[in-house]
Amino acid sequence: MTTQNPGLVTIEGMPSGACGAITWWALSGHLLLEDLADGYTAEGLSPKHLPGLPTPANALHRAALQVQDKRTLVRPLDRSGMWEVLTESIVKNEYGTPSCLHSFECRVELRPDGTGLVTPEDHIYAAKILGSYRVYRQALIAHDISVWLTGEVHRLQGVPLRDRGGLYFLPADKMAEWQAIARVLRGCSSHLVYEVPALKTEQTVEAILSAVRKDAEDELKAMEEYMAREPDLISTKGLNSHARTASAVRAKLEHYAKLLGAALPDLTDRLETLTGAIGAARLIEQSTKNPEALGVAPAP
């Protein structure tokens, strides 16, 4: 069976002529990072690519949201890491006009030592919130996994096929690692990662090159905007970050040129110009901070 999707001709199975695959995912529930790490070990994947745990504040907020419903609200307070739980009710005044009345239920806060506190401690919600907090300290929700998978797609030189994301292309030589990640997720959660092989046709090449162009242009635009800033708004840290991005964009453009037999010379030229500008700016930044190191005489 063949299907048509964003200009890509796809077929079931991985034929020898496939240049990669279209991939997407369906996420449900949460998983423990420990289980994910165990799966990575079993598959021989590098643990350095595992996602991180949520911060204690995020974990406690997620726990507090477990008691929220149509009439129970969780609102942040002025101090970071503190929320109040309110019950909302509808009341009518003497004229019959309805209005909302909020009644205080309890306060949830993150202590300096990372533990959670619900006040009053004997409140009916306390056990549920604190129990959920213990889980969320070690768990990743669907949003965490989606952000992580999107990052993994880019690390494996994949490109989004839609502006709003959700559908990606991965080159064939990266599919083995991606499939291993998918197996780990299937084994330790209800998350599912799908893939459909993409046959290398004229339409395929056109669609993928369009996606590669959009992806690279977004990165180049961000770099160009940064380099157009006033000199005092450009830092060594920022320059180093954009230099790493430029290196990653170059590697991706070269990878797809080899994969598809088609290059994007205009983007390559822009990238080289930017790389040169970043390198020059880094030298200027270094000479300003340490002129002797570069053989530049200090200003009198």
Image (cartoon, rainbow, N blue to C red):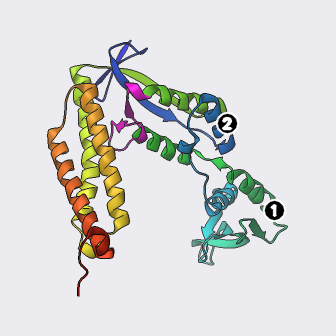
Q: Residue at x 49, y 47 (%)?
A: 147
Task: Say which mark, if any, is on residue 38.
Answer: 2
Q: How many marks?
A: 2
Q: Position of residue 211 (x, y in %)?
A: 28, 37
**Quadrant of the rendering where the C terminus is positioned:** bottom left
Q: Rate crowding at label 2 as few (under 14), some (14 to 19) or many (20 or more) other CA atoms within 10 Å.
A: some
Over which residues does the magenta segment extend?
Answer: 155-174
Q: Nearer the viewer, residue 14 or 258?
A: 258
Task: Say which mark, if any, is on residue 124.
Answer: 1
Q: Position of residue 107 (x, y in %)?
A: 72, 71
Q: Residue at x 38, y 34 (%)?
A: 168
The type of residue carrying mark 2 is Asp
Q: In the visual, does 134 lie left or right of 225?
A: right
Q: Position of residue 276 (x, y in %)?
A: 20, 55
Q: Position of residue 124 (x, y in %)?
A: 81, 62
In the rendered image, residue 41 lying in the magenta stretch gets the answer no
> Measured along the vertical axis of the image, is residue 30 above or below residue 87?
above
Task: Say which mark, if any, is on residue 181.
Answer: none
